[in-house]
Image (cartoon, helix red, strand yellow):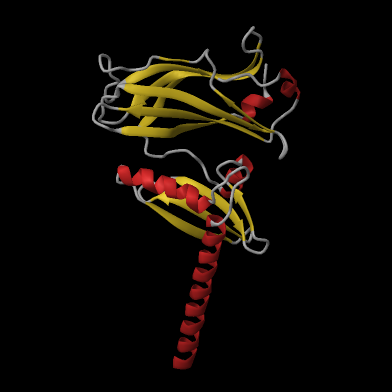
Amino acid sequence: MKKSFVLYSILAAFVLLMGCDYSKKAIELVKNTKESGQILTNSEQMQKEIDEGAKKNIQYKWVANKHEQYNTWIVSFVDTVYERGYFWEADLNNNIVKSINDNWLLKKKYGITPLRKDRNFTIEEIETEEVVLQNTRLNNGVVYRIKGKIKNNTDKNITKCYLGATLVVIYTEQKILEQKENNDSNFARPSTSNPWKPNETKDFLIVTEAIDQIYKEYKPEDAFCFILISAEDPLGYEYSGAFEERSLKKHFSEIM
């Protein structure tokens, strides 16, 4: 009994040690990789983030986790509080590194999302939400439109604020469309004389840049839109990121 326990403990320690070793290899592989078009390695690029974070008392960490299903490692460089940052797929068998941040299919594959879950800002009411074929001189094609109210759930008086969107429509691995909000979007920006107060709601309208109308003839594998916000108060509070995700596959399959 004792011998079995000792043997099990030794094997467990060996497996743990090997896991740590591969974890370090995955991190080093990512650190030493240069992304396409970059002069600096990922390690050198992330040092800039560390230097900037130090000015705001933000600390970062490198983490590697094995993904058994795909026999790959997910390496991340994230802040120690919200764990937001950069992610890579590391294939140690072939020494291949792929950026996940720049690849919507990899994000979907590993369940990595830019969505913040702190609920500092929320959509409280949706008046209309649709994907339609729009024919205007400046925005001709398929657009996503959402109108409603956003609530400031913080205890801050927001005096600077920008509202945006990232629409992603996946047809095939080779055809992924990404569009931002256009000039038809409307959101009354707060100011020092007219701040966005705590628990107050504001009207908003987001209309995305048009996708060529030929895509009306195809049903996407997936479609979604992230609603983004950047906000500041006079005392140094800063917020930036996606606070809402809208699933739109059905909407795109029913374009009128």
Residue 208 sits above or below residue 225 on the image: above
Q: Position of residue 209 (x, y in %)?
A: 59, 19
Residue 173 sits above or below residue 17 on the image: above
Residue at x 33%, y 17% (from the top left corner): 190
Residue 127 can be seen, yes or no: no
Q: Position of residue 232 (x, y in %)?
A: 32, 28
Residue 235 can be seen, yes or no: yes
Side of 142 where 78 appears, left or right: left
Residue at x 48%, y 51% (from the top left corner): 44
- Quarter in which the C terminus is drawn: top right
Residue at x 52%, y 56% (from the top left corner): 31
Side of 45 where 102 appears, left or right: right
Q: Position of residue 212 (x, y in %)?
A: 70, 20
Residue 247 sits above or below residue 48 on the image: above
Residue at x 69%, y 32% (from the top left corner): 220
Side of 236 where 253 appears, left or right: right
Q: Position of residue 29 (x, y in %)?
A: 57, 60
